[in-house]
Amino acid sequence: MSEIAARYNPKEVEEKHLKIWDAKKPFHATAKKSKKGAFTIVIPPPNVTGVLHMGHALNNTLQDILTRYKRMQGFDALWMPGTDHAGIATQNVVEKQIAKEGLTRETLGREKFMERLWEWKKTNGDTILDQLHKLGSSCDWDRTRFTMDESYSDAVKEVFVELYQRGLIYQGQYIINWCPRCETALADEEAEHKDANGHLWHIKYPFKDNPEEFVTVATTRPETMLGDTAVAVNPKDERYKDLIGKVLVVPLVNREIRIIADDFVDREFGSGAVKVTPAHDPNDFAMGRRHNLEFVNIMHSNGVLNNNAGPFKNMDRFEGRKAVVKALEELGLLAKIDAHAHAVRRCYRCDTIVEPYLSKQWFVKMKPLADKALEAFHQGQPSIQPKRWEKVYENWLVDIRDWCISRQIWWGHRIPVWYDEEGNHFVARSEAEAKEQARVKWGKNVVLKQDPDVLDTWFSSWLWPFATLGWPKKSEDLEYFYPTATLFTAPEIIFFWVARMVMAGLEFNGKVPFKDVVLHGTVRDAKGLKMSKSLGNAMDPLEIIAEYGADALRFSMVLNSGQDIYISKEKFEIGRNFSNKLWNASRFVLMNIKPEAKVSSFDEIDVAKLDVASRWIISRYQKALAEVGQAIEQYRYSEGVNLLYEFFWATYCDWYLEMIKGKLDDINVQKTAYLILENTVKMLHPFVPFVTEELYSEFKQKEVLLTLEAWPTFYPDLIDEKAESSLAVLVELVGAIRNIRAQWNIKPHDQIALVIATENKDSITLVKDNKDILNKLVRTSDISFEKTVPVIKNAVAGVVGDMQFFIPLGALIDVAKEKTKLEALILQQAKAADAIEGRLANAGFVSKAPAEVIEKERERMEELRAKNIELKKALVSLV
RNA sequence: GGACCCGUAGCUCAGUUGGUUAGAGCGCUUCCUUGACAUGGAAGAGGUCACAAGUUCGAGUCUUGUCGGGUCCACCA
């Protein structure tokens, strides 16, 4: 390996292994191959409009770590990849594209427009998957699915028809969130609240029989007054009690409306009287229903005012607002204008202000579905991590509202409903089935028209965990790989997706689709802003991969993934440097060991003959293995990667490799150095798959894939507390120094020199600059050296007769300090034990405290006492 | 309005059930091109753990309050 450059080149290596993995397909999962069983993760399908961003990089790295780990543990690990058609988002993209050619979807026509969409999907749709591939994602790429695949669409239709037949889907005329730009309905979650500084306009409505008197109402949307059909007051409001039932005239449109009483009205807000616009406000809609009011729609679907707006017709809604205000002002009916901060709903795709709009839509009745999900949740399914999101999830299920699933766009699953000329609807899996239903109804063949609308994009996404496995068909894959293990996603998507998948899973497969839900942080820039294209602060993962390597990207990302991640370019240096260190340490080991030292098990090492340093590293390694495994299982990835970083760099490289530099002719030491390295590379593989795969092929010198190797076995017997304790190292050090003193007959405070061994061992150079180290050594041992003590790189080495000793500089601990430290601890623990003893002797405490508390206290005391005895022993051995 | 999270070194963050002198990376200072690695190594400076009170033998960690930053949810017109 000596011919290999000293600097690791990620680009070359990553390209090489991507090719090998693609050819050998080690990530392909087959049902019932392994005794361990299945382990499944489904990818949160990225939108086909998507380009890889840092959030994806993090999300998929986390999934990959767990999948690779489980695969190495011997599970049939399936990571299912795929993409989402992302209805509105994709349609918007393509609409923008054709706009450049001067076209709109209407001019192009549905069929042609759909062709353009499919074309777009074909050329750009899988870009993001290619990019995920470059990241090293170990997906089973042969199974890649798309939410508009034919079989997937069958699942969508099946679910619609089933839910309809179960009475869980209905059609109705309701106020929904309407985006006048996209000209489609939006679900509640798709209409985001954003704070805005608006105004509160106070408008005077004159009485019909007394135009000089008014009732003043307040509104944030004055143009909606054109559709007012009542004014409401609280029935308990003394001010308005006598006015209930009186008739007012809506200015500008001269509509006569009544004052009604409704508990909804808050007496404290504004004037205490509310204008009621049933066709343009959800609350007013409810009031309209309660009081049988007229529903006056004043707007076209594109936000332009219609004939009902009288003189304001053909104006855009905001233009209309200005005009209405101006007209009121001129009539002297504008009482006042207040500044008013409130939340405005905006379209989550195009940020247009959403209009509450009355229209006929399809809805899913959510309560029965949510109740099942709640019941499962109360039994711990799924578990949600971190736990703080549990409440958020639960609250949403409790306060669930019906889900508007129809969208007035073209890109998506066409609603499987057909209408006859009378407007009767037939819900069916196919047109033929619908025709059959109609024939039965009418006794003859009739002409049917399919509903022009499509389904909400989430109406297909919520089937993802099982529709990707072939549902509704029964298959071995579905049987074996469902339900899945873990869902990794961002918290923003709990309602859109996570909760709904649980509902669909329960409803159609009787099982919660995943055991655990892991919600990771949002990736932010160094200033803490969300990374997004529109803010221009997005970092391109592909650029990072090109510059630092995918391993570096993954490593740094995970290392920083505690809560929200604040990322800046410099952070990837850590990952890059780590790969390089790994590379060079491996070089060092391979250069210094014989081929027969490449053992694959601790059974092949004669542990009894090993030096303290080697027993120490084996012990530390065993602990690291256990801890890393646990960290991965518990989704504490940043901790896992941190443990590995510490273990490999600080423990293995800085200490162990330095300590053994004089002992490398010992085959047992060689074996230890190699085996720990190989196993560390295995442990690192889920995190940094490329560099580890490359190193493994260097180790083995034959065609083997690390990605299919077994995760290292934990040997608890090899944990050697004695070798491990820093005290043991210290004792050894002190002993060694004593030996030197005895052998060389060194007197205290004798003049000494510290030297570096150079190429030519005969020529010795004095290094004055290492005086600090020297002083420390002297302090440590309260002796001084007469003879020269060579420093080999980072270790102090001594020769006593034919005995050599090597001590890493870091081990030179100050004995006096160590003594004080120990004494303080002994004192403190003795005090603690005394305190507990005193408490236990107190009759009052014993009579009041529960037995288990007393028992616990006693145990604690005994523990402290025992520990103190140990510490005293250590102190004695030190002195 | 409801719920949640965060405040630890100049910066970004760890700190598992309370327990030795609170850690890491970057940055900074000094030194070292030495034989795996300068994408490296050694040594060092730098923190009253936001503040206050409480529980405890012992609090960065638990409780309460205050201040500051952030997120999610929400039909006060």
Image (spheres, rainbow, N blue to C red):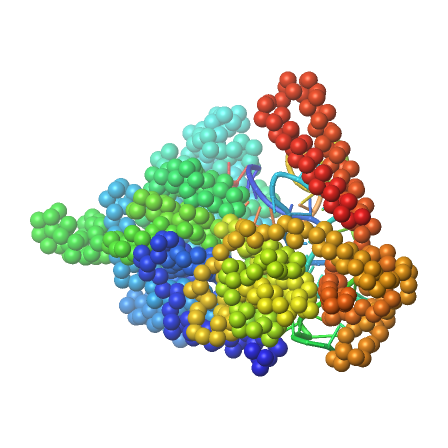
Q: Where's residue A544, x and y in %?
A: 56, 70
Q: Nearer the viewer, residue A269 or A314?
A: A269
Q: Is residue A852 left or right of residue A709?
A: right
Residue A192 in view of the camera:
no
Where residue A457 sits: x, y (%)?
A: 37, 56
Vertical position of residue A476 compared to residue A394: above or below: below
Q: Is residue A164 left or right of residue A331?
A: left
In front: A605, or A100?
A605
The one nearer the camera, A568 or A221, is A568
On the rendered image, what quadrant is the N terminus of chain A found in?
bottom right
Residue A683 at what x, y percent from top left?
A: 52, 60
User: Residue A728's spot in the image, x, y percent?
Assistant: 70, 52
Question: Residue at 67% across / 31% down in the picture?
Answer: A861
User: Which residue is rendered at x = 45% and y = 75% of the image?
Assistant: A702
**Viewed as shown, does residue A175 lie left or right of A1?**
left
In the image, A779 versus A205, the foreground residue is A779
Residue that protrudes farthest toward the left in the picture: A443
On the picture, is A583 further left or further right than A130? Answer: right
Q: Give the answer, above or below, for where A589 lies relative to A406.
A: below
Indicate the quadrant where residue B66 lies.
top right
Instruction: Please determine whether, in this image, residue A108 is positioned above or below residue A835.
Output: below
Kindly identify the residue that appears in the image at 31 percent across and 70 percent down. Answer: A115
